[in-house]
């Protein structure tokens, strides 16, 4: 879909979302959730955060990153209790735009609670717009764009930084939310590689052995697979 031909989508709610979790491996569960709700003018109407009982141990490496311990989670709600109960299942009948940094990580934990969820990944957006940036971590991009909220690997701080990053990019590029969605989801063989030892080179010009390595090494859901399938 070309940006100029885009028809505006409608959402019942737009949120920026972040989870802190028990680890990075498949089957990880949230230990903290945060979101803020905003409108098309980037006016924030609600901010929500809570620690979450994951009902499983926290990996030491993950605890070192976010600082959340099992003791902090005693008596906290599970994710189901928090969303179904404390928030009255409010997303269950809604089409929700979920903005997140590395949305492929956060969305699967949240999507089951929505009637429909559309994701806008600020990491993919930055990779598409600024492929030669030093890297596309939230902290690097926040510094690059002088975002006032510092990401700290706690959910609400990272949500705030992600929201300000989105708002800054939208203003800088003069693009609507729907236009940013198209940019974030579109990659062609002519796009520049945004990571790795061939960063900055057109994907179509990558060495065949490197393409083979990418296809066997990266997780099946990675965005680059359908692109290199065109080579």
Image: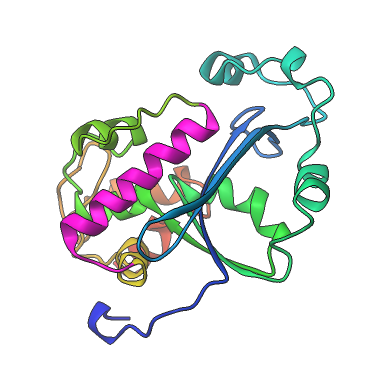
x and y percent of residue 65 in the render? Answer: 52, 18
Residue at the image point whose x is 31% and y is 64% from the top = 180
Residue at the image point whose x is 38% and y is 37% from the top = 161
x and y percent of residue 43 in the render? Answer: 40, 56
Is there any visible trace of residue 212 in the rendered image? no
Give the tally of numbered discs.
0
| Image quarter in which the N terminus is found | bottom left
Q: Is residue 182 above or below residue 122?
A: below
- Residue 189 located left or right of residue 39: left
Q: Which residues are magenta?
A: 154-176
**Residue 149 in which image quadrant:** top left
Question: Nearest the camera: 68 or 212?
Answer: 68
Q: Is residue 229 above or below residue 71?
A: below
Q: Is residue 213 above or below residue 173?
A: above
Residue at the image point whose x is 28% and y is 86% from the top = 5
Residue at the image point whose x is 72% and y is 58% from the top = 113
Is residue 196 found inside the magenta-colored segment of the image? no
- Name the magenta segment's main secondary structure: helix
């Amino acid at each position: 879909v070309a940006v100029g031909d885009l028809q505006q989508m409608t959402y019942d709610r737009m949120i920026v979302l972040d989870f802190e979790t028990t680890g990075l491996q498949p089957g990880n569960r949230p230990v903290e959730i945060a979101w803020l709700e905003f409108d098309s003018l980037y006016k924030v109407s609600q901010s929500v955060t809570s620690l979450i009982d994951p009902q499983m141990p926290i990996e030491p490496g993950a605890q070192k990153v976010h600082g959340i311990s099992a003791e902090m989670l005693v008596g906290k709600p599970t994710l189901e209790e928090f969303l179904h109960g404390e928030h009255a299942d409010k997303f269950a009948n809604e089409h929700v735009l979920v903005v997140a940094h590395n949305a492929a990580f956060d969305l699967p934990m949240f999507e089951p609670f929505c009637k429909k969820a559309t994701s806008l990944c600020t990491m993919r957006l930055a990779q598409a717009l600024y492929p030669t940036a030093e890297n596309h971590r939230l902290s690097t991009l926040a510094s690059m764009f002088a975002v006032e909220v510092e990401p700290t690997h706690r959910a609400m701080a990272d949500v705030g930084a992600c929201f300000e990053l989105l708002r800054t990019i939208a203003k800088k590029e003069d693009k609507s939310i729907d236009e940013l969605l198209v940019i974030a989801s579109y990659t062609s063989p002519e796009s520049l590689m945004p990571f790795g030892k061939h960063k900055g080179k057109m994907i179509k010009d990558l060495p065949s052995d490197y393409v083979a390595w990418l296809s066997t090494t990266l997780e099946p859901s990675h965005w680059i697979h359908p692109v290199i399938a065109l080579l």
